[in-house]
Image (cartoon, grey):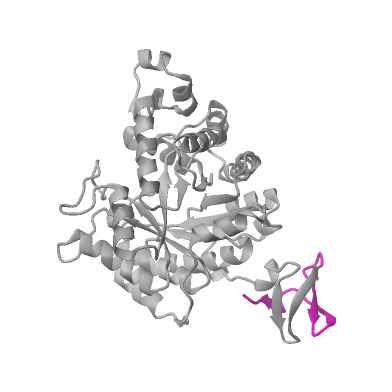
Amino acid sequence: GYSTSFSIIHTSKIISTMSASSIPQDLQPDPKIIDILKKESASKIAHVSLEYFPPRTEQGVKNLHARMDRMLTNTKCLYTDMTWGAGGSTADLSLQLALHAHRTGHVSNMHLTCTNMEKDGDPIAAVHDALKQAYDGGIRNIVALRGDPAEGDEKWTATEGGFTCALDLVRYIRKEFGDEFGISVAGYPEGHPNRISELSAEEVESMTEAEKGRCCTHDGVTYVCKDDDYRKEMDYLKEKIDAGSDFIITQMFFDAEVFKTFVKDCRKWGINCPVVPGLMCINAYPGFKKMTKFCKTRVTKSLEEKMDSMKDDPDAVKRFGVEFGADICRSLLASGVEILHFYTLNLEKVVYGITDDLGITSGLIETSNESDAKDMVAVGSAWARAGDTVKSSAGQGVVKEIKGDGTAVVDIDGKDVELAKGSYEKVF
């Protein structure tokens, strides 16, 4: 997914604050995500996974903790991704946040890159140390990535003596840890940004049909991953899977047909593992423009015109983000997709709007809260559904019905008890 460089303020203070949390340490290790995907595949129910990034400040971390708790409760996400900072800039914080996710009930999918990683001058030791800490903390799922350039660098360069690509990292994990970790890798339906070329006017005219289907235009310039380069990308992806990766999470896209073509191409290449679509929520006009240009992402003319028409109306952009996101998700689900992976941007409103629209959740967008930490208190009663176990002063039981005013009818010891909204909370 798209990531950007964050300058971490008082990182050690943030981490020490997190470590002080009174969280039980005797949890079971996480299951492997590939096993969850295989199990849930039989259910034919749409599921979600959510991705977050390490915030810049101590307050941001506290806010994120609250949001992650709420979003897990509300969406029942199958797993939670935590990105590894661009250029290795947030490595320690990423690890602590991924461990926190595990300790608070998430199936934690920790991103790990081989960018600017070193311990006592040894880049291999730094990666091994991060994997060992993750393993010891109960994490059993890793997203193996090369990583973005370090902050201030134009191009990515390998650390001397370290890994040169995600394939190296996959091989290393399998060599050193065997089958202990589940591993996912990135897939690029439009081609990796490094393999996307700027086209001349003549080249634009001579594009193949496949190239036309994944090309993009930004500021009047057309870019595409040419067919030869796309084939190299697919060959490399096949190597990553053959080396021991379990499934693929894609880079963001805003054209469902690009994803569908990519899945078909994966199957042509003998890549038969799950391909999970990475979905960037449209939250704000400036961010959308910046991300799509940076990643050279395909934006259809109709989407570009719609976004431009709303550039001065932030609320309209969020509303459209929900509408567009739900439409693209419906198209993906109709094509056989079983899980939707949302790049949340550490926000909740658009995600909730999309999941509400799809019927995965109900009524969440009205209760979404993107204000400061004082308002980020999860009210367990607001999210209960029929079949959930709840507890209250009257005892513990199973919800039979939620009435329009939030009152829950709960079976407690064989008796139907009505509990007012706010007087009960979920049990996990």
Which stretch is magenta? 403-428
Left or right, 39 with respect to 266, comes to right
Task: Give how far across and how far down residue 211 sits, in percent.
Answer: 44, 24
Left or right, 92 with respect to 377, comes to left
Task: Give how far across and how far down residue 250 sits, in percent.
Answer: 46, 44
Task: Give how far across and how far down residue 294 sits, in percent.
Answer: 37, 38
Residue 348 visible in rendering:
no
Q: Nearer the viewer, residue 228 or 63?
A: 228
Q: Quadrant of residue 426?
A: bottom right
Residue 346, magenta (yes or no): no
Which residue is drawn at the image coordinates 41% and 70% (left, top)?
A: 99
Left or right, 264 with respect to 400, comes to left
Which residue is drawn at the image coordinates 49% and 26% (left, top)?
A: 213
72 is higher (above) or lower (below) than 49:
below
Residue 417, magenta (yes or no): yes
Q: Nearer the viewer, residue 130 or 174?
A: 174
109 is higher (above) or lower (below) than 299:
below
273 is higher (above) or lower (below) than 269:
below
Which residue is drawn at the image coordinates 62% and 43% (left, top)?
A: 336
